[in-house]
Amino acid sequence: MSLNDLWEGAAKNPYHPTVPKERQFLVALTLLLIGIAFLEKALFTSYTYSAPAETQAEDDEDDDDTIVFQISLTALLETLQIFGVNEVKDRWTSRESAYGGIAGSRARGSSATPFGNRVLGVTGMCRMSYAAKGEPLCIVLEESGITTTCEMVTYEPDYQDEIPLQRDALALKIIMRSHWLYDAVIELSSTSPSRLTIEASPSAPYLVFSSTGALGSATIEFSKDQQLLETFQVPKRTVNSYKHSLIKAASRAMQIATKVSIRGDEQGVLSLQFMIEIEGGGVSFIDFRFVPLLPEEGEEDEADNDEGDDDDDDDDDDDHVMEAVS
C-alpha cells in the first residue's frame, strides 16, 4: 500500500483494539499518526482467547486469527478513569517532578514503573470481555468493594490498514535513550513550530532535529558517540519533516520509556518505537508511526545536492535489536 492510498483511505481516526490469539493486545489510531501499544499476555493476570466459529472454519485458508472492532477512545478513557485514576496519578507525578518523575525514580533505584500501581493509581482489578462480533465490549472495574460494569458499543472498523513502514527499505535506524529525544522535542517546542525536521547523515552532523516557528528557529545535533546513539545505521543523507504537534503527542511515551528506536523508510514514514520496562523485569513496546509532510520549497533540492557529498561510513556498530512483535 502506498502513502497515496493511505491519504485517500484515512479520512477518519478510528480506534482499533485488535486481539490476536495468545499474543498481544494492540491499540491503533489511524490518521497522520498511528499509535500501537503491544501488551504481552504476561501482563494480564488471566488471558483467555476463544476463536469465533467463522474464524476456526477459515484457519486452513487464512492465518489471520485476529478480532478487530472499533470503539470510542474518549468513552474508554472515561470508563478506565471512573474511580479518579488521573487524580491519584497527577498527585504522584507532581511530587516526583522535581526529581525527574518516573525516569528519575528508576535512576535512583526505585521500583516504580509506568505500569505500576503507584504510578497508575489503580489498586483494584479491571476485567475486559468481548463475547462475539457485534456484541459490546464489557469492562468490569472492582475497587474497595465497589464493582462498576460498563458496556461499550462496538462498530465495524472504518479503516483497518496501518501506516506502511517498509522494513526492507529503511533509510535510517537509530537507537538512543528515550529521555534524550524527549528533551530535544521539548526544547524545540519553545519556538512554537508547526513542523519538525529530522535530518540524518553518515557524516557530521549525524543526527539533527530542527524547527522554525513564530518565535524563531532552533537546532539540536547529536554526535555519533555510542554513548549517545547506541545504534546508528544511515547509508545516505535523508531529510524529512513531520507535524510537530503529532510528534509531541508521543511525549508521554518518551518520558516513561527506557530506549527509543528511530526508524524511517525511503517513503519518509517515521517509526518511533519505545521500549518500556514493566514490573517483574519484562518490557513492553509502544510504536508511533508518522506520515511525512510535503517538502517545502527548496528543501528537496538541498537534499539532492548534498546527497552526492556524503561519504560512506564503514564503522560497524553493535546492532542492539529492539523489535516488538509484529
Image (cartoon, grey):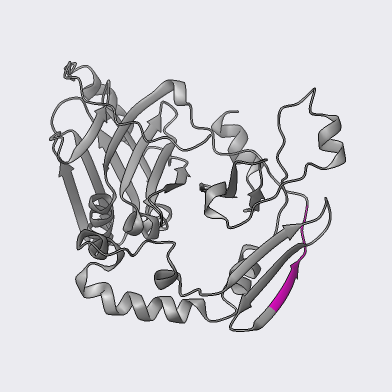
Q: Report x, y in % for residue 135.
A: 83, 58
Left or right, residue 300 beside residue 80: left
Q: Residue at x 65, y 50 (%)?
A: 16
Q: Report x, y in % for residue 301.
A: 29, 28
Considering the image in quadrants, where does the N terminus appear?
top right
Question: Quick check: can you spot residue 44?
Answer: yes
Q: Report x, y in % for residue 205.
A: 14, 34
- Nearer the observer, 106 or 80: 106
Question: Quick check: can you spot residue 298?
Answer: no
Compared to residue 191, the image places residue 303 above or below, namely above
Q: Residue at x 31, y 63 (%)?
A: 111
Q: Give the farthest residue toward the bottom.
A: 145
Q: Residue at x 48, y 26 (%)?
A: 166
Left or right, residue 58 beside residue 96: right
Q: Is residue 151 magenta?
A: yes
Q: Residue at x 45, y 21 (%)?
A: 168
When asked about the image quadrant of residue 161, the answer is top right
Give the residues in magenta.
148-155
When asked about the image quadrant of residue 197, the answer is top left
- Nearer the observer, 116 or 315: 116
- Nearer the observer, 308 or 159: 159
Left or right, residue 273 beside residue 32: left
Compared to residue 285, the image places residue 63 above or below, namely above
- Nearer the observer, 295 or 316: 316
Considering the whole magenta stretch, tell me its main secondary structure: strand
Q: Report x, y in % for residue 99.
A: 20, 71
